[in-house]
Amino acid sequence: MMEKQRPAYITIVEGPPPEFQDVTNEWSIGVLEGIEEANTALCEMRTFSGPQMVKRCEDAWAEGRPARLDFPTGDGGERGELDIMAIRWDEVEEGHKLFIWLRV
């Protein structure tokens, strides 16, 4: 019996639930081709270390493991998780900003 691969996580510890922007376009449809029906959403957030967050996902994918976003839902301490499909970071005035594409 094969052991289930442990996902790499990016966790939002503080603050309100993230805002998810629908991104239905050719790129996201191509990334999500498969048997399961799914949509793609984009989440933008600030972080102290964009390169480390991107590397965490890249390392997991290179090992064949999933990467997931763990976030507060705003429902009295409840948490949600979504699969990360792609991630990049950019330097902005406030520090680093992550752009995370998620399967929803």
Image: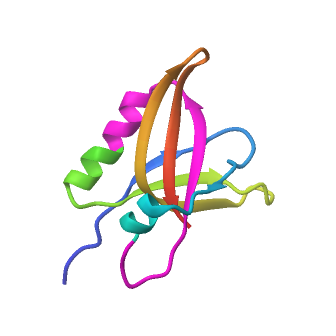
Left-right relation of 76 to 49: right
Magenta stretch containing residue 77, yes or no?
A: no
Q: With respect to residue 37, does 26 lie above or below? A: above
Q: Residue furthest right?
A: 76
- In the image, the segment drawn in magenta is 33-56
x and y percentages locating residue 102 in the rendered image: 51, 58
Q: How many numbered dots are placed on residues in this image?
A: 0
x and y percentages locating residue 24 in the rendered image: 56, 63
Left-right relation of 15 to 29: right
x and y percentages locating residue 62 in the rendered image: 20, 52
Q: Nearer the viewer, residue 75 or 54?
A: 54
Q: Residue furthest front?
A: 26
Q: How is the image coloured?
A: rainbow
Q: Which quadrant holds residue 16?
A: top right
Which residue is at 57% across, 57% downward? Answer: 23
x and y percentages locating residue 66 in the rendered image: 35, 60
Magenta stretch containing residue 54, yes or no?
A: yes
Q: Which quadrant holds residue 56?
A: top left
Which residue is at 59% across, 14% downward? Answer: 93
Q: With respect to residue 98, does 22 lie above or below? A: below
